[in-house]
Amino acid sequence: MVDREQVCVLIPTYNEATAVGDVIERFRAVGYENILVIDGGSTDGTREVATDAGARVVQQSGDGKGQAVREAVGLVEAPYVLMIDGDATYRPEQADRLVGPLFDGVADHVIGDRFADMQPGAMSRLNQSGNRIINRVFSVVHGRDLQDILSGYRAFTTDSFERLSLSADGFGIETELAVECVRHDIVTTVVPVTYEPRPEGSETNLRPFRDGGNILITLYRLAKKNNPIFYFGSVGFLSGLVGFVLAGFVAFSWVVYGISREVIALASGVAILFGLQLVMFGVLSDLIVTANRQQRQQFQRIERRIEELDRDDSPPEPDGPGAVDTDDTVSVTDESE
């Protein structure tokens, strides 16, 4: 059962005056009154519109969506956070399907899958292709298929968020959230949501090529902590491949033309040895990461077991105000009898 009073709706904004008021009003219409808008210095009146619509508005101290999210969650006192973009591309009426798994205890992080119900014109073909490539790379590098890691509609517990090590400042925050959930074994589930076109007069802050490139770089960079054998092994493989190509060229020159190329041969040997060392380092790093992950899982199981024992040992609540435990009462006989 969803308790909407326990949920804080978090809306990061930057120049979203056209749509943010409607988003807030729709959330309040379905029972979500705790709404926090964190604004990145809008110049179009976004903060005033959000305030008039009934939201609590805070201006972020830094720049970028990632910094805004980290700062805003630190201000949230509710145990659950529902994060959504302020551009009216998501439906507030579907909020319960995102926070539902949190209240049911089946997940600590929920991602809304835009591709499950994408309306015509909601996303260009270029952006769709880029999103699918990024999701595919994520599944290969990090070993989980979360279907839509760039979705801006997601819900999570504040406790699980505090376990994540986040540093991205821009649009890479969604990617980093997905990677960190995998790395820290945060139970994550995906639910279908509807994705709609932006309202007329509303302009996107996303730049496909620049932001897409940054996201791919972020995915690769974060593989160092989550999948080091891929991170170091890919560079090692490329180095070894270059070394073998150079070695083939040296051998061809010697056999066909009788020309020895000592410098290229030396470079070939260095490249092959460097590649082998990187692969070996990646394997050792992966062993360490796996051991740490298993150890963390054991600590989490112990922590959950201790919490269960504490709940079992806690005294039962009295039946009502002024209730007295009959086992502890002393029967007193009226002396007048």
Image: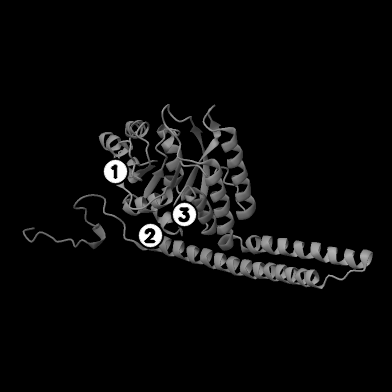
Provide residue 227's location: percent of width, then percent of height: 61, 60
* Residue sitting at x 24%, y 57%: 326
Provide residue 126's location: percent of width, then percent of height: 59, 36
Question: Looking at the image, is mark 1 or mark 2 earlier in the sequence?
Answer: 1
Query: For the residue marked with disc 2, what is the amino acid?
Result: Arg
> What residue does disc 3 label?
168
Q: Which mark is residue 311?
A: 2
> How many residues crowd mark 2 within 10 Å: few (<14), some (14–19), many (20+)?
few
* Residue sitting at x 47%, y 47%: 171
> What residue does disc 1 label?
57
Q: Distance of mark 3 from mark 2, alpha carbons? A: 38 Å
Q: Using the image as rendered, state which of residue 252 and residue 166 is in the foreground.
A: 252
Query: For the residue marked with disc 1, what is the amino acid?
Result: Val
- Circles 1 and 2 in contact, beta carbons < 8 Å: no
Which quadrant would residue 26 be assigned to in this image? top left
Provide residue 55's location: percent of width, then percent of height: 29, 39
Provide residue 35's location: percent of width, then percent of height: 32, 41
Q: Quadrant of the N terminus?
A: top left
Which quadrant would residue 276 be assigned to in this image? bottom right
- Relative to residue 209, is residue 140 depicted above or below? below
Which quadrant would residue 29 be assigned to in this image? top left
Question: Looking at the image, is mark 1 or mark 3 earlier in the sequence?
Answer: 1
For mark 1, give the secondary structure: strand
